[in-house]
Amino acid sequence: MIKLRTRTLLLLTISVLFIFSSCGTQTGGDQQQSGKITQVKHPEWSKNLSIYEVNIRQFTPEGTFNALKAHLPRLKELGADIIWLMPVNPIGELNRKGTMGSYYSVSDYLTLNPEYGTDEDFKELIKTAHENDLYVIIDWVANHSAWDNALVAEHPEWYEKDSLGKMISPFDWTDVVAFDYNNPQMNDYMLNAMKFWVNEYDIDGYRCDVAGMVPDTFWVRVRKELDKIKPVFMLAEDEAPRHHAAFDMTYGWEFHKIMNDIYSQDKNANDIENYLHKNDSLYPSDAYRMYFITNHDENSWNGTEYERLGDGVRAFYVLTATVPGMPLIYTGQEAALDKRLEFFEKDAVEWNNYPMADFYHQIFELKKNNPALYNGDFGGNWKRINTGYSKEIFALLREKGSNKVLSIVNLSAEPLTFNLEGDAFSDDYTRLFTNDKVKLNKNESITLPAWGYQVYFK
């Protein structure tokens, strides 16, 4: 059997291609002025939040909306206030992969997967989330549908064809067939389907699958129309800067890869600084970037965070939460999940008393309460503090008004003692995780164990 290429490698390839082509790409209407992207207006509630990805099928033994609902107060306490639900639509059976199929093979855009529950169950889930001050976005697959989606038979003209007139699958995703966005009626259908879920269920936005494979003009139109209903939050599964004409947030795939490469010793802390400078030069200042050490693709196809990052899991997550951007937590991270969840089969998480919950909770609470770590222009600028160990130590100062966060991470397998050079960081702080008060002085001496970290805040 030929091994399938992973979605992650494909998405990385797509993202790189779109980044290099973004300068010459039109995003439509008044969203682009003199080649500079005009950033969308973020919903006010998103300014200081973090995001949690829910794999509904694997989240509980039942794999239902009702079973998930019981976890909502716990997720609120954890502190990641945007809940991203992987696709809630029914899954196609024709050319299905595995026993249960891919979440991203949608057989009906206007109904719910019956395996998850009823219409009333889903409405109650959204209502309960909102009562817990949680915001819910759902995964949306606009690029392709299942082969047995009724649209294939009813509107074959809505799908891409090869030179022989046959419908085609993107890449090796043989369980789906690609839409043709040159067809105006197809565009209208997809827009109205997205409006339906906001109108009927009061969801708060979308995470859009392979967003870079769908025309920019469609996304700009979608954002304008959805914002007429309510302020929505939109996450693009792509990292091309141009997507911020329609989306609040894009994936930080490159940063994720840098972290993996640092642990394997192919890169070092200097690559993080270079990345952040590049990010500042390419993206609107108010663009949200999503950073993560794992997600559903990484976990299932490339390995758990413990396989890829080993003893550095906590250190790398401190990085994702303190650089400018929004941190993601995926199903099972708070339980220190150390297994690859099956993608096409039932494979429920074993929660094991949430041994990492306090670690994530304290990070999310700091982000929520300290403006230096807010998202986009709501947050503070960044400055790297020199230590004399430029390859091993990444020390980052974020400031917004009188608020400061200083994070220091040892990105090596050796304990190190070093000085924080200069005095830009000098101040009275509280130390995260221990809550003790400390004063950091000019040229402060710090000792960190292998893959150790300290976070100070004011």
Image (tube, grey):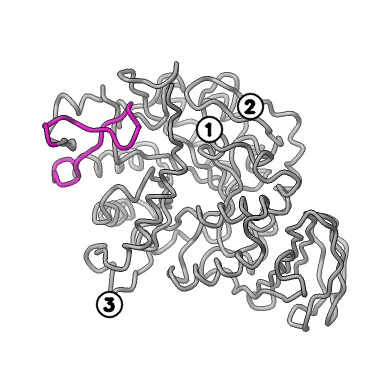
Point out the image quarter for the C terminus. bottom right
Q: Residue at left 35%, top 48%? A: 211
Dot 2 or dot 1, earlier in sequence? 1
CB-based contact (under 8 Å), mark 2 and mark 1: yes
Quarter holding residue 62: top right
Label 3: few (<14), some (14–19) or many (≥20) C-alpha neighbours in 10 Å? few
Label 2: few (<14), some (14–19) or many (≥20) C-alpha neighbours in 10 Å? many
Give the residue pinned by disc 2: 349
Along the line of sight, the residue nearer the viewer: 105 or 13:
13
CB-based contact (under 8 Å), mark 3 and mark 2: no
Q: What distance separates the C-alpha of mark 3 from that of mark 2?
A: 49 Å
Mark 1 or 3, which is nearer the eye? Answer: 3
Q: Amino acid at mark 2?
A: Val
Where does residue 54 sit, x and y in percent of width and height? 54, 36
Dot 1 or dot 3, earlier in sequence? 3
Along the line of sight, the residue nearer the viewer: 412 or 244:
412
Q: Amino acid at mark 3?
A: Ser
Q: Residue at left 65%, top 48%? A: 79
Label 1: few (<14), some (14–19) or many (≥20) C-alpha neighbours in 10 Å? many
Q: Residue at left 40%, top 56%? A: 16
Q: Is residue 231 left or right of residue 23?
A: right
Q: What distance separates the C-alpha of mark 2 from that of mark 1?
A: 10 Å
Q: Which residues are magenta?
A: 163-186
Query: Is residue 291 part of the magenta span, yes or no?
Result: no
Give the residue pinned by disc 1: 55
Where does residue 418 sit, x and y in percent of width and height? 84, 71
Q: Is residue 347 left or right of residue 439?
A: left
Give the residue pinned by disc 3: 34
